Image (cartoon, rainbow, N blue to C red):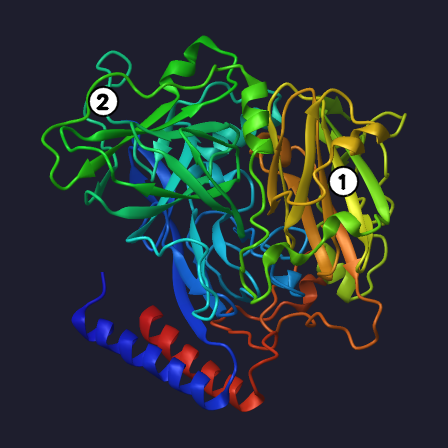
Amino acid sequence: MLSGARCCCVSSFLVLVWWVTACFGGDPYVFFDWTLSYITTSPLGVNQKVIAINGQFPGPTLNVTTNWNVVVNVKNELDEPVLLTWNGIQNRKNSWQDGVLGTNCPIPAGWNWTYQFQVKDQIGSFFYFPSLDFQRAAGGYGGIIINNRDVIPLPFAMPDNDITIFISDWYTKSHKKIRKDVENGKDLGVPDGILINGFGPYRYDTTSVPGGIAYQTINVEPGKTYRLRVHNVGISTSLNFRIQNHNLLLVETEGSYTVQQNYTNMDIHVGQSYSFLVTMDQNASSDYYIVASSRFLNSSGWDKATGVAILHYTNSLGPASGPLPDLPNEFDAYFSMNQARSIRLNVSAGAARPNPQGSFKYGDITVTEVYVLLNRPPELINGKWRTTLNGISYLPPSTPLKLAQQFNILGVYKLDFPYRPMNRPPKVDTSLINGTFKGFIEIIFQNNDTAVQSYHMDGYAFFVVGMDFGVWTENSRGAYNKWDGVARSTTQVFPGAWTAILVYLDNDGIWNLRTENLDSWYLGQEVYVSVVNPETDKSEPSVPDNSIYCGLLSSLQRDQGHRFMFSSAPSVSSASRTVLSALVIAFFGYFTR
């Protein structure tokens, strides 16, 4: 916790930052100084190391406004390299800040690195997490809130408060042990529990929940309406979220305002984020259960995979009681798919810009390329367990793709990813999708695995236009939603089913397309999409001043220090960068000395 003197210094510093921004023009800057380290805690009653940020688990929330510039200085006090990625933040024309192995060298233990990105033309609910080596299984995640600018009204009444909720499957063994097991072909198995905001379950049942476990209590006032931003930050388990006796009015998902509909529960798959308005309209005879429970786990141990928190009215007369609110049929994937299909874009609502977000008539645009991506369960390739897309298991090169592209290093990757599954043995390779700048591509995910897979694309929001069971064919397009399919960055694909998305490739860079399920991702189920702007005045910034170099470029690495990069902020003049840099260096020097 900050001392009074340092709190005063922080306030003065922020005033100076805002003064400099106002004097020199451009969008505001906000600064964060984060230290990633291990702490010992016991969310399920067993002591274990988790990854905390500034001693917090979950980490702090980035609460910013559309078009703000965000500067996050990350110091790595873990015992292994780390990268943070910003799930759903598009980093317009700046994939250098994406925080995945294809674009950044990892931050070595004991080093620091400063991310800088602008939340350009975005609103909504997102989260960040460590992207390497199963580290998300140990924590390190936190929320991102991007608020509307004042000139853009919300499509609903301003809620009385804003609450972020993280739901996740959780294992008591370390992330290092989990990844070793996955490398050896072991299934993850049933999670040891489900956490809500880093806490274990309330003891709703003395048989299945041991005593002495700390649980989350969310305090509310009767009659008020709250915006709940719910993120599934787990590693592999689809979760059903619900609140006893309360409706969930869906209003937004991953940066898109939705048609407002009431749900009694919502299936939230790995990596997905939703915003609900919940009105505290019940009597206060007791508290109420908040529940996150596993979906589609084919195991007798599923009953322990339930997270329970408490919704506490300020005038509550007693503890929550009775059975947990009903879960939809455990293995009814049709229910879950129909629920997903019911989520539609609110085409009459403004979002980050004054014009309605739905005015982009994607259904009238000619598709330029079609990719059918087939995934398979883990299989042995060259004696190692791997997962594939179209028979290719992605192999990260020692030199990140972006750096190889920037320095014209040949042989690091190939732009030859196949459009369709190939009739050949699977292989390990570094093969990229060669995307056409401002092309409009159709991607069909075909899931041949036995588990729900979530797919995420960095740098973009895509339109989810269709999903169904069976094998996708050309005729499947007849059932596409070409008017108000929701735009988001993460979509689910059910076992034995397909999901189709449309993506407008207007954001140049190299962008990661992956499964969010960590076991499949870690074993190679990902691909990168290269989108090059052919214009001569390259719109994407060159390599950042503070870049970390590795692989074939290791000789370029300078001594580590507190370096801050402002070259990617086109709205800030050189004089402003100089003054801001001096302020930031002085500020972080004060707090890190």
Is 523 on the left-hand or right-hand side of 471?
left
Image spot of residue 171 (x, y percent): 42, 27
**Does 100 appear above or below 137?**
below
Q: Secondary structure at mark 2?
A: loop
From where the camera sits, is residue 549 visible? no
The label number, if any, that marks residue 203 in the structure image: 2
Judging depth in this view, the residue of 68 and 579 nearest the camera is 68
Q: Residue furthest right?
A: 423
> For mark 1, does the 10 Å Cα neighbourhood hold few (<14), some (14 to 19), or many (20 or more) residues?
some
Instruction: Decide which of tag 2 and tag 1 comes sooner along the chain.
Output: 2
**Does 509 appear above or below 198?**
below
Going by the numbered disc 2, the residue's amino acid type is Arg
Judging depth in this view, the residue of 524 and 160 nearest the camera is 160
Q: Residue furthest front?
A: 348
Q: Determine the residue positioned at 39% across, 81% down.
A: 18
Snapshot quadrant of residue 424? top right
Going by the numbered disc 1, the residue's amino acid type is Ile
Task: Determine whether label 2 and label 1 are within 8 Å by CB.
Answer: no
- The mark closer to the camera, 2 or 1, is 1
Q: Determine the residue positioned at 40% across, 29% down.
A: 264
**Does 515 appear above or below 591?**
above
Q: Secondary structure at mark 1?
A: strand
> For mark 2, does the 10 Å Cα neighbourhood hold few (<14), some (14 to 19), or many (20 or more) residues?
some
Image spot of residue 2 (x, y percent): 23, 65
Image spot of residue 593 (x, y percent): 33, 72
In the rendered image, which residue does mark 1 sit on? Answer: 443
Q: Determine the residue positioned at 63% across, 51% down.
A: 461
Is 217 on the left-hand or right-hand side of 498?
left
The label number, if any, that marks residue 22 in the structure image: none
Task: Give the CA distance from mark 2 to mark 1.
Answer: 44 Å
From where the camera sits, is residue 39 visible? yes
